[in-house]
Image: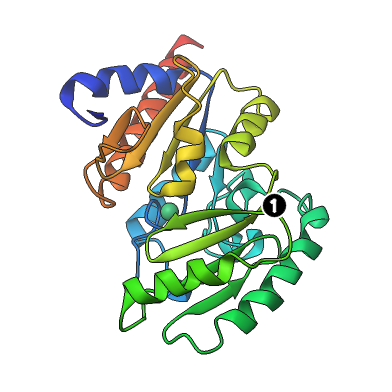
């Protein structure tokens, strides 16, 4: 993995910014810091302001594990062109076919986890998040969740995250599929994607040199991302670089006229 904002890579990043590029971001842990109470997650003011500016200069997408409406409500004034929820499953109501399978899974998990301390089931319609950040014994809670998942009625895909286990409909589009569809829809030549967690690996694993720049928040040896930001706060610096690159480009364009 290479540091995205190293001096050497900054110049290259400005070249990427000059192309027809779609910018796409995960939300929790990427645009917003991770917090103990998922309902309280929000962008810092500075990030929100920069995202607003970036959205005026580039086509932008947010692809989150949250429900689409939930994440859309956390983007402040930014005019994000594409908002995708449920880890890539939920684009404009496209998740309808998966809802009944997931509703059956919710019923089964509510029964299976009723007596497990510190586990919170979040029903997001077309995916489920089982949070165990608040459990007194997180490891034990995690293994009890995994046990409950073994008896689910329908086919599902289980993806662990940071103090959360996500249950997704089997065979549904993932974040990587969503990103490729949006890159086409926006007629961009390339996309830059930033994420921090396990479901973001569905994007990182696409490996499309020249057409996709993958960035992970936090270096990690196990990740397929090419680049990393050192920590979540560096998202501000990245957004600043992207704003400055296009603003400079716009000025050059103006002087030509
Ligand atoms: Mg995340």
- The reply to whether residue 36 is visible in this rendering is no
Residue 217, quarter of picture = top left
Q: Position of residue 134 (x, y in %)?
A: 36, 80
Q: Is residue 112 left or right of residue 27?
A: right
Q: Is residue 162 left or right of residue 237?
A: right
How many numbered markers are drawn? 1
- The reply to whether residue 87 is visible in this rendering is yes
Residue beneath the point at 35% across and 70% down: 35
Residue at the far top in the pictured view: 256
Between 113 and 195, the residue placed more toward the observer is 113
Between 71 and 223, the residue placed more toward the observer is 223
Q: Quadrant of the N terminus?
A: top left
Q: Is residue 178 left or right of residue 115?
A: right
18 above or below 116? above
Q: How is the image coloured?
A: rainbow
Q: Position of residue 88 (x, y in %)?
A: 62, 46
Q: Position of residue 93 (x, y in %)?
A: 79, 54
207 above or below 167? above
Between 242 and 173, the residue placed more toward the observer is 173
Residue beneath the point at 44% across and 18% down: 18
Which residue in the protein does label 1 denote? 90
Residue at the far left in the pictured view: 7
Q: Residues within 10 Å of mark 1 (few under 14, many from 20)?
A: many
- Ligand 1 image-quadrant field: bottom left
Under circle 1, the secondary element is loop
Between 189 and 180, the residue placed more toward the observer is 180
39 above or below 46? below
Residue beneath the point at 42% across and 69% down: 143
Q: Position of residue 244 (x, y in %)?
A: 34, 31
Residue 129, quarter of picture = bottom right
């Amino acid at each position: 993995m290479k540091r995205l904002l190293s001096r050497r890579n900054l110049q290259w990043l400005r070249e990427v910014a000059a192309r027809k590029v779609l910018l796409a971001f995960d939300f929790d842990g990427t645009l917003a810091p991770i917090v103990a109470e998922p309902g309280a997650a929000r962008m810092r003011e500075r990030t929100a302001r920069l995202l607003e500016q970036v959205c005026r200069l580039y086509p932008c997408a947010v692809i989150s594990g949250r429900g689409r409406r939930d994440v859309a409500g956390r983007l402040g004034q930014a005019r994000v062109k594409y908002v995708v929820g449920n880890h890539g499953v939920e684009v404009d109501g496209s998740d309808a076919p998966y809802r009944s399978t997931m509703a059956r899974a919710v019923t089964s998990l509510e029964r299976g986890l009723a007596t497990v301390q510190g586990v919170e089931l979040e029903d997001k319609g077309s995916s489920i998040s089982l949070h165990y950040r608040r459990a007194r014994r997180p490891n034990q809670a995690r293994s009890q969740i995994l046990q409950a998942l073994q008896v689910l009625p329908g086919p599902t895909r289980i993806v662990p995250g940071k103090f959360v286990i996500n249950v997704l409909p089997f065979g549904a589009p993932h974040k990587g599929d969503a990103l490729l569809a949006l890159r086409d829809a926006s007629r961009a030549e390339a996309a830059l994607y930033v994420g921090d967690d396990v479901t973001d690996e569905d994007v990182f694993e696409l490996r499309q040199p020249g057409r996709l720049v993958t960035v992970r928040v936090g270096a990690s040896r196990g990740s397929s991302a090419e680049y990393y930001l050192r920590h979540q706060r560096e998202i501000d610096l990245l957004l600043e670089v992207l704003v400055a690159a296009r603003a400079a480009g716009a000025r050059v364009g103006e002087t030509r006229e």
